[in-house]
Image: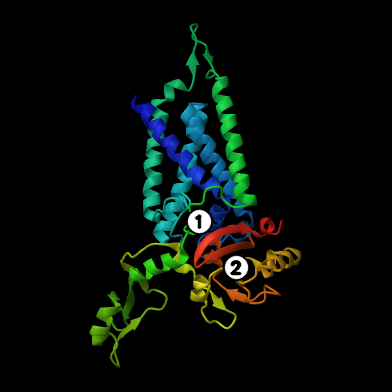
Amino acid sequence: MIKGLLRFIIAVIFILSGFVKAVDLVGFSFKMEEYFAPPVFNMPFFEKFALLFSIIVVVLELFLGFMLLLKIKLKFTLSLLIALCVFFGFLTFYSAYFNVVTDCGCFGDAIKFTPWQSFIKDVVLLVGLIILFVLYKKEFVVRDEYGATRKESSNKFKYYILGAFSLVMIYIMAQGIMHEPLIDFRDYKIGTDIKGEKEKINKNPSEYKTFYSLKNQKTGEVVKVNQDDYIKETKYWKEGTPWKIEEGKNESVLIKEGYKSEIVKFKIEDASGMEITEEIINAPKAVLVFSYHPKEVSADLLKKVEAKVNAQKGALIYGISTDPNTFKTIKNAMMDGTAIKTIARSNPFVLILEKGKIIDKQPAKDYVE
């Protein structure tokens, strides 16, 4: 009873974790790119394979979790899940200890974990899997009445269920890669009122304090001092002081958690550097074309998209990317590439707002069809 319940809980956790990532494989690949980037593992060569690695990880989570749920090839399934947990545990510990990736993406955009929370989750799962391995050890082989060992008996019905599950998940993953996620867990889902979210953020902002790392040039003593105490204590900054700020070691620490939303990063500037966010979210209708990798977009596709958005009468139209010269016949605007990736996964894509509310978003290739 206990081992059956434990098996069910762990299997469901892996299936849910794999499902929320399978829905948005492109988004998970962005997280993988963070791990391969120079500040983390410094393996930029692998960044181009981030999507492939994401597919492999998600497929393992989903199918091993489902095999565990159905008790298919238990020894094989549990062994691979333990290996997967060790791998995830290493990544989350590295992220937490060195504070390099603030969200591992374990449950996509559906549930946010801090790095340490993710690591603890992986340790608990690993312990649970080891316990299951021990409890089910006797069932790895089954003895017949003559005492001869034979393989675990196959159950065709279980494999039919696994096959049907596989087809559904392949469809969901393909939709997310070729178009947009079938289920949108992001803050930018259709129906979101960006203007309203901005107002909530402004009313309840998060508060941070800077902590300076100060080193005494005479004694070698190092202290951490917050910005308020630094100003109050003249000994730290008066003329001739032996205390010096250590470059690159200052920390910004969250003091008060405000209203949390990715829309805090929705800031758009025109080509001259002037912010135009308010103009866009207050417009009766705004048609925005986004691109986070403008150099990877074909000129023909951009031409078609620009032609179609230019036909939208009475709409405020902008092309928003990381390059001020991306668009030829519509006004160019700028936005951080990472922030653009949080809005939609296609490159490029079209976002349509009415008084700041998202009424539609589509991959550009679907928009022009």
| Amino acid type, residue under disc 1 in the picture | Lys
What amino acid is at disc 2? Leu
Percent coordinates x, y for residue 4 in the rendering: 38, 27
Describe the element under mark 2 as helix, strand or loop: strand
> Residue at 58% of width from left, 25% of height from top?
160
- Residue at 48% over, 37% down: 81
Q: Quadrant of the N terminus?
A: top left
- Which residue shows up at 60% across the image and 30% down it? 163
The figure's colour scheme reads: rainbow
> Relative to residue 161, is residue 59 depicted above or below?
below
Local crowd size for mark 2, using a 10 Å CA cut-off: few (<14), some (14–19), many (≥20): many
Residue at (24% x, 87% y) in the render = 234
Q: Quadrant of the C terminus?
A: bottom right
Tell me, yes or no, if residue 127 can be seen here: yes
Q: How many C-alpha atoms fall within 10 Å of the one at disc 1: few (<14), some, or many (≥20)?
A: some
Query: Quick check: marks 1 and 2 in contact, CB under 8 Å?
Result: no
Marks 1 and 2 sit apart, C-alpha to C-alpha, by: 15 Å
Q: Which residue is mark 2?
A: 288
In front of the other: 286 or 142: 286
Q: How many marks?
A: 2
* In the image, residue 245 above or below residue 166: below
Q: Earlier in the sequence, mark 1 or mark 2?
A: 1
Residue 345: % across, % down = 58, 57
Q: Which residue is mark 1?
A: 189
Q: Whole-percent x and y of residue 79?
A: 49, 34
Decide if residue 322 is on the left or right side of residue 207: right
Residue toward you, 128 or 361: 361
Vertical relation: 271 (above or below) 289:
below
Whether residue 38 is visible to the viewer of this picture, yes or no, is no
7 up-or-down from 224: above or below: above
Residue reaching furthest to the bottom: 239
| Of 218 and 316, the residue lying toward us | 316
